[in-house]
Amino acid sequence: MDFELELVLRARKGDICAQDELARIHRRPMFLLALQLLGNHEDAMDVVQDSLLRFFTSLHRFDPGRPVRPWLYRIVRNRVVDLFRRRKVRRHESLDAKDEDGRPRFELRDHSVDLEADALSAQLRKNMWKALSRLSERQREILVLRDYHDLAYSEIAETLGIPIGTVMSRLHSARKKLKQVLLDEFQALLL
C-alpha cells in the first residue's frame, strides 16, 4: 500500500497525525496554485485553509484508489471560483505588486550565489508572469496546472471537470496565445 493511500485511510478514521501529514505534504502546492490563480497572498492563504477544511470534511467521499493531488487542486480551484463569485467584481492585483517592504509579492526566491543568473532568472519570471497576466483566467489556469504544477492531462481534466480533449485544446490555445503575447512584448522592446 502506498504511503499517501495509507494516510488517507487513517485520516478517514479520524487519525489527527495522518491528517496533519496530508496537510503538510499538500499545503505548499495548494498555496502556490491558489497564489498563481488569485495573485494575492492573503486570499491564497484563506483559500488553502478553506480547501483543507473542505478536504477533511469530505474525505469520506474520496475514492482512495485515486490520486489526492487532482482532487485537492479541484477543491482549491472551486474555492478560488467561489471567492471571485462572492466579490462579483473581480479584483486583480498586478503580478508586479510589492509588499509593505517593497519586495515583490510573487517572487519565489532562489538563494543561489550566482547574482547575475538570479537577476536574469528574476527578470524572466517577471516577464513570464506579466505575459501570463494578460491571458484569460481559463488560459492562465490551464497553463499553471500543466506547466507549473506538472499535472498530467487526465489530472487536469479531473481537476477542471472537463474532457481530456478539451484540456488538450485549451492548452494548445493558451500556449499559442502566450507565445503571441511574449512575441509582442519582445517586438515592443526592439522598437
Image (cartoon, helix red, strand yellow):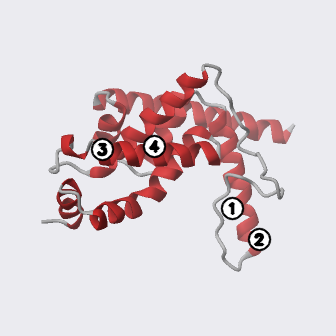
Return the x and y of residue 31 as percentages of the image width and height. 51, 51
Please, what is the three-letter code of the amino acid marked with disc 2?
Answer: Glu
**Residue 57: numbered disc:** 3
Q: Is residue 158 visible?
A: yes
Q: Earlier in the sequence, mark 3 or mark 2?
A: 3
Q: CA distance from mark 2 to mark 1?
A: 8 Å
Task: Tell me the element at label 2.
Answer: helix
Q: Which residue is mark 4?
A: 50
Q: Residue at x 54, y 35 (%)?
A: 140
Q: Which residue is mark 1?
A: 121
Question: Looking at the image, which is closer to me, 157 or 131?
Answer: 157
Pointer 2: residues within 10 angstroms few (<14), some, or many (20+)? few
Return the x and y of residue 51 as percentages of the image width and height. 42, 44
Q: Residue at x 37, y 38 (%)?
A: 74
Q: Eyeballing the image, is 20 above or below 187?
A: below
Discs 4/1, front: 4
Pointer 1: residues within 10 angstroms few (<14), some, or many (20+)? some
Q: Which residue is mark 2?
A: 116
Return the x and y of residue 179 as percentages of the image width and height. 60, 37
**Residue 47: numbered disc:** none
